[in-house]
Image (tube, grey):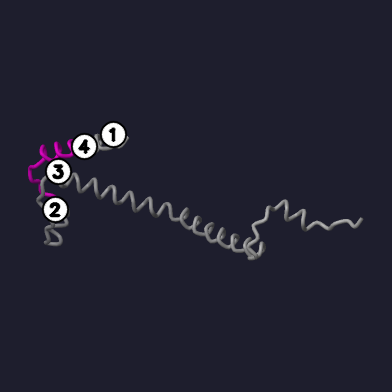
Amino acid sequence: MRYLKYLFLLLLAGCLLTIALANRDPVTLNLLTPDLVSLLNVSYAVTLPLYMIVFAGIAIGILVGFVLEWFREHKHRAEARVRTEEAKTLAREVGRLKGTSGDSQDEILALVEAAPRKAG
């Protein structure tokens, strides 16, 4: 199974390398529309190879997906935290009710020994 993972990663790296080599030409990325450039008299433009823009877009998409998923799972993490605290409280209560005598008797034997005995 480990070899399949390495084979998949090798194929993925080969595909990404092929895309990068095929798209090395510089591309100008304008961050503002021409109307906003003329209105603000500020031009924000970046010239990068096309593959860097594509890979940056993929990375930003993955990052946005992780953040959105983290927010979506917040209620589940909060519920788990409440349940964990509740379980700890119940475990402390069970320990308190059993006492800290440390006797590790079988429950059945403890019931038999605690039962009132008939005289006779």
- Quarter of the image with the C terminus is bottom right
Query: How crowded is the residue under tag 2: few (<14 C-alpha within 10 Å), some, or many (20+)?
Result: few
Which residue position holds label 1? 4
Q: Position of residue 97 (x, y in %)?
A: 67, 63
- Mark 3–mark 2 distance (CA, rounded to whole Å): 24 Å
Q: Is residue 83 above or below residue 27?
A: below
Which residue position holds label 2? 34
Q: Nearer the viewer, mark 4 or mark 2?
A: 4
Classify mark 3: helix, strand or loop: helix
Label count reads 4
Q: Position of residue 78 (x, y in %)?
A: 48, 58
Pick whichever of labels 3 and 2 is earlier in the sequence.
2
Q: Is residue 26 magenta?
A: yes
- Mark 4–mark 3 distance (CA, rounded to whole Å): 19 Å
x 25%, y 35%: residue: 8
Q: Nearer the viewer, mark 3 or mark 2?
A: 3
Pick whichever of labels 1 and 2 is earlier in the sequence.
1
x 31%, y 51%: residue: 64
Dot 4 amino acid type: Leu
* Residue 113 located left or right of residue 118: left
